[in-house]
Amino acid sequence: MSPTPFAIIAGVGPGTGASVARKFAASYPVVLLARSPSSYEPLVSEIVSGGGKAVGVSTDVTNAQSVTDAFASIGKEFGPEPKLAAAVFNLSGGFARKPFLELTQKEFDAGYEFNGKAAFLFSQAVLPLMLRSTDLTYPPSLIFTGATASVKGSAMFSSFAHGKWGVRALAQSLAREFGPQGVHVAHVIIDGVIDIPRTKGWLNDKEDAKISPEAIADAYWHLHSQPRTSFAFEMDLRPYIEKW
């Protein structure tokens, strides 16, 4: 019997990550990676109680050994040669808004650690599984969550911008290398404030001024379900009032 394909999401906060997990859990078992069990346990319980399958794995995606251990655990859960339908890199971190001449090396390095390095480690772990999953209903999809800083290095955002630009460059390189092998690699620029509990008091003077996490998840599913005849590499998502 063929192994059951699954989806994996790295970074499952209350916004994009959780909504993407719920969306993909309607079709696949989902694996949720986060440093702390408190980040994924409520979501695992929610998905399981709704009739889906979800597994949380405590993982520091910036650490090579932690990623190796996480995928060893996944192998025990889904078998030695699992089929991976979709992988979403949704890590956030390394954000420091301050003048460049006041920025510490530790803060600058964090922009790389949580973005370029973590995306590299995650991609090296998921791509071998995806290369043997090209016979599924939809092409296996590796989707990276980007931000405004992925394409615009604003003043006082040098740490975050260099990290996000690095993820976008990595995604573009991987799309060119692995697209011809049947793996859909895409990058999504989230250009605006996401509507989550932490931003509840923001931008309330205009209706629909924040990005719906559920709409982001719908966009990710749209990318995942695209056929090989029409792979999109990049998508911009922003509210109608966002200046760009």
Image: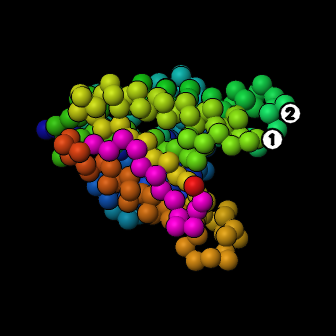
- Quarter of the rendering occupied by the N terminus: top left
Residue under the point 48% across and 30% down: 169
Does 181 sit left or right of 177 as displayed? left
Does 206 sit left or right of 222 as displayed? right
Q: Are marks 1 and 2 in contact (CB under 8 Å)?
A: yes
Range of residues picked out in magenta = 231-243
Residue under the point 49% across and 26% down: 121
- From the top left corner, tell me how far across and down residue 26 is, in percent: 32, 59
Type of the residue with mark 2: Glu
Q: Nearer the viewer, residue 188 or 23?
A: 188
Q: Secondary structure at mark 1?
A: loop
Which quarter of the figure has residue 228?
Answer: top left
- From the top left corner, tell me how far across and down residue 177 is, in percent: 32, 24
Residue 48 in magenta stretch = no
- By secondary structure, the bulk of the magenta-drawn segment is best described as loop
Which quarter of the figure has residue 162?
Answer: top right
* 10 Å crowding of disc 1: few (<14), some (14-19), many (20+): some
